[in-house]
Amino acid sequence: MTFLGWFQIVLYCAIVVALVLPLGGYMTRVFNGERTFLTPVLRPVEVALYRLGGVDDRQEQHWLTYTIAMLLFHVGGFLLLYLLMRFQAVLPFNPAGQSAVAPDLAFNTAVSFITNTNWQNYGGESTMSYLVQMLGLTHQNFLSAATGIVLAVALIRGFARASARTVGNFWVDLTRCTLYVLLPICVVYALFLVWQGMPQTLGPYVDATTLEGGKQTIAVGPVASQIAIKMLGTNGGGFFNANASHPFENPTALSNFAQMISIFAIGAALTNVFGRMVGNQRQGWAILAVMGVLFIAGVTVCYWAEARGNDLLTAMGLAGGNMEGKEVRFGIVASALFAVITTAASCGAVNAMHDSFTALGGMVPLINMQLGEIIVGGVGAGMYGMLLFVILAIFVAGLMVGRTPEYVGKKIEAKEVKMAMLAILILPLMYLGWTAVAVVYPTATASIANPGPHGFTEVLYAYTSQTGNNGSAFGGLTGNILFYNVTGAIAMLVGRFWMIVPAMAIAGSLAAKKSVPPSLGTFPTTSPLFIGLVVGVIVIIGGLTFFPALALGPIVEHLAMTAGTTFSSN
């Protein structure tokens, strides 16, 4: 651990915080239907889209109608993406002559991209055509990210409104989010990435002759346009199999730093949107502080573990930190920071191999995902996931003072607490349930590359990542088999939509309630005490739920390492 390493971490945090106010203010105006500097250019396009889709932008929806519209929209997205992959061999823009994607892999991938997971049981440059990468994957990257954002905004409206029956209009929110927020930023962002050296072409793959005289095919394509929304929308699916460690996906140290910032930008700014909409920006800063405490704790542990390295190698005189699986261009600090960011934000992009991290270093990304990726989180998903934990913390605080808990003027009653618990508990059911099946099912265990606790962690990480809609992986697991493709798809669907429905039910319930003015008995929700309470509730729930599984994986692996025990695959 070095001064320059910590300076990079502090600089990163400072830039993200600096973006919160301007980006939060802009998004608030967009979702309130107010005029922005882009309105003169984009409003005619917005109106044309409403007319084309038969949408009345003045008509709002009940929470149930809003949710059903969202679900039906994703059914259409799934069918489009699945068919594109199954018929890609006969479709245009396929210069490498990619064949049709197998049915189970196409099913898993289609589910993956509509759920904002972008789990990839394939190598992008060797499996997907340009058309699928653009019309299928990049297209869904925009829409799945926009969906997460607008669902968070709908829940925020539930807190902000009083005696209301509606929480917005899904079609209007989706259009505005894509048109005013995601597209403009991504156009500028993609041009920046091209400037940094990222390809953006429809030309064929390039054949090159190596210094030894051998032939090599270099994959190129429309990369920059996909990477921009992959990072900004916390999608994570790479154009190339090596993801953000590939020089064409991450050419320079500057592009690496910009990608890390873009992963957190919208998620952090949504806390400010919350504060603005409920009429008290301090509420948003309190939520961001909770996220910040958990993030800094994770970065500290991961950076320390990777900088310290492996005790066995240190004993052999090979000290210097753990560089296994890391890009020399980025080093330990940028790799550890990227790993914590991408798993805190349900992005899933990687610039280093998480499977090669030390036991404790790899445990931090795993814990980030198991908590529901609420530490900034995926665009929108992190915000509504964090608000579920806030509801539970307020409920605990209410029990302490002996009165009905309140939050931003709304009484939190049994219905909201039950819905919050349902949404939170559905995630470990998928993480732990499918892991238990996979580690005893012979076909599944045959895909585990490493023995002992690390092999167990590979499986646990896979289902945690998919259920949490992250998409990163421990690379030692061969996931492209029927069992993992099908069960992983189920985990992704449940992790995304079974959490959304209770959250939207809470939005509808809160919107219908009257606002209650604060009184002497109201628990202050912008104080350090409240921030500590929320952090405590998150840590306690996470510890009680996941510690036994972690004890079987990374914890026992770390203890074995300190004792000098190794595990052989022979």
Image (tube, rainbow, N blue to C red):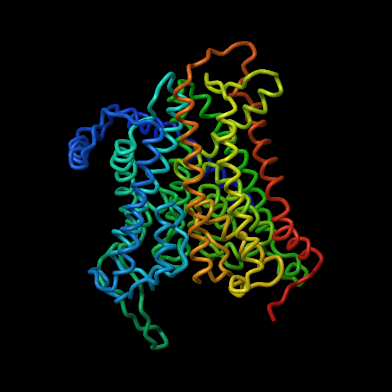
Report x, y in % for residue 501: 47, 40
Report x, y in % for residue 523: 63, 20
Q: Quadrant of residue 224?
A: bottom left
Q: Residue at x 69, y 60 (%)?
A: 359
- Please indicate, yes or no, whether residue 251 appears anywhere in the rendered image: no
Tell how many labels. 0
Residue 207 higher or lower than 161, as above or below:
below
Instruction: Return the residue found at the far bottom.
Output: 213
Q: Quadrant of residue 562?
A: bottom right
Residue 394 higher or lower than 163, as above or below:
below
- Please indicate, yes or no, whether residue 142 appears anywhere in the rendered image: yes
Q: Nearer the viewer, residue 314 or 393?
A: 393
Instruction: Return the residue found at the far right.
Output: 563
496 sits left or right of 2 in the view:
left
235 sits left or right of 462 in the view:
left
Q: Nearer the viewer, residue 134 or 314?
A: 134
Residue 156 higher or lower than 254, as above or below:
above
Q: Residue at x 68, y 78 (%)?
A: 569
Q: Nearer the viewer, residue 497 or 126?
A: 497
**Image quadrant for the C terminus?**
bottom right
Instruction: Return the residue found at the far top.
Output: 520
Report x, y in % for residue 210: 39, 83
Report x, y in % for residue 465: 55, 56
